[in-house]
Image (tube, rainbow, N blue to C red):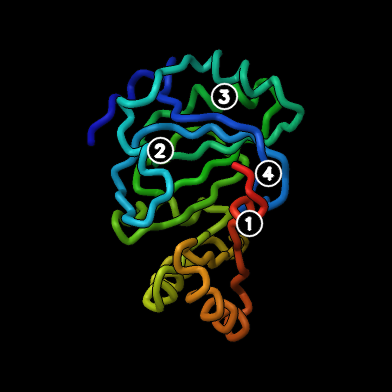
């Protein structure tokens, strides 16, 4: 799915909402999420498949996006998708930072990095592997565990991130009862990893 990434004045916004970050290092913090349309990674277990086709979602100006974010008290912004790096994000992040926001991104790393980020959460997917140059830039490596082979996949990517990168293993939601015990045992044996849970699904917030 090819997208026009030269137009940085508008972006396809599937949804934007104020909630708690439910996963990873910033879990539990109030955050304003901006979910961009468009994804060519195609995870079969994706819980936001409606985001895949960018043409289904309205184009909103960067000014509109930021104006909506300013209605809420938190200064933590999370850009997610879909795959947000299918879009050129330099202008969006420049204007967000000018307004005093902290810019976080959640990405598979399958497209070139754009934007000025305070925190990069890299969640690599087997369906379309991350670009090698993104791995050393990640602040957080979050690997979704669907089966036992994902531990090997996680270690392959952990070998290429920086020494300061936080390492997380997260159970795929529909298989959480099966894989969470495996993750717990793995972390006990490999304590450089930590457990990430989708707490927003447990407490029933977006």
Dividing the picture into quadrants, the one containing residue 54 is top left
Query: In the visual, does 138 lie left or right of 164?
Result: left
- Residue shown at the point (49%, 39%) measured from the top left: 80
Look at the image and tell me whether residue 91 can be seen.
yes
- Residue shown at the point (59%, 79%) measured from the top left: 184
Secondary structure at badge 4 equals strand
Q: How far apart are marks 3 and 4 (CA)?
A: 24 Å
Label pair 3/2, CB-CB below 8 angstroms: no
Secondary structure at badge 3 equals helix
Of circles 3 and 1, the one toward us is 1
Image disc number at residue 20: 4
Please tell me whether residue 29 is drawn above or below residue 102 in the rendered image: below
Q: Earlier in the sequence, mark 3 or mark 2?
A: 2
Secondary structure at badge 2 equals helix
Q: Distance between the residues labelled 3 and 1?
A: 34 Å
Quarter containing the C terminus: top right
Badge 4: residue crowd in 10 Å (few <14, some 14–19, many ≥20): some
Q: Distance between the residues labelled 1 and 4?
A: 12 Å
Q: Where is residue 151 in the image (x, y as percent from the top left)?
A: 44, 75
The residue where tag 3 is placed is: 94
Which of 189/185 is in front? 185
The residue where tag 1 is placed is: 202
Of circles 1 and 4, the one toward us is 1
Quarter containing the N terminus: top left
Which of 75/52 is in front? 52
Look at the image and tell me whether residue 24 can be seen.
no
């Amino acid at each position: 799915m090819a997208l026009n990434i030269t137009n940085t004045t508008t972006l396809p916004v599937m949804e934007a909402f104020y909630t708690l970050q439910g996963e990873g290092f910033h879990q539990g913090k109030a955050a304003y999420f901006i979910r961009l349309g468009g994804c060519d990674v195609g995870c079969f277990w994706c819980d936001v498949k409606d985001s895949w086709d960018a043409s289904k979602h309205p184009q909103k100006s960067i000014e509109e996006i930021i104006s909506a974010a300013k209605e809420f008290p938190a200064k933590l912004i999370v850009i997610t998708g879909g795959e947000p790096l299918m879009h050129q994000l330099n202008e969006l992040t420049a204007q967000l930072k000018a307004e005093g926001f902290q810019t976080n991104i959640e990405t598979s790393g399958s497209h070139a990095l754009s934007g000025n980020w305070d925190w990069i959460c890299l969640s690599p997917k087997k369906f379309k592997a991350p670009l090698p140059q993104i791995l050393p830039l990640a602040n957080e490596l979050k690997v979704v565990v669907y089966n036992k082979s994902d531990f090997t996949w996680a270690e392959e990517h952990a070998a290429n991130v920086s020494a300061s990168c936080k390492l997380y293993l997260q159970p795929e939601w529909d298989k959480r009862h099966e894989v969470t015990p495996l993750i717990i045992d793995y972390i006990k044996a490999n304590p450089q990893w930590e457990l990430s849970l989708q707490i927003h699904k447990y407490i029933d917030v977006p």
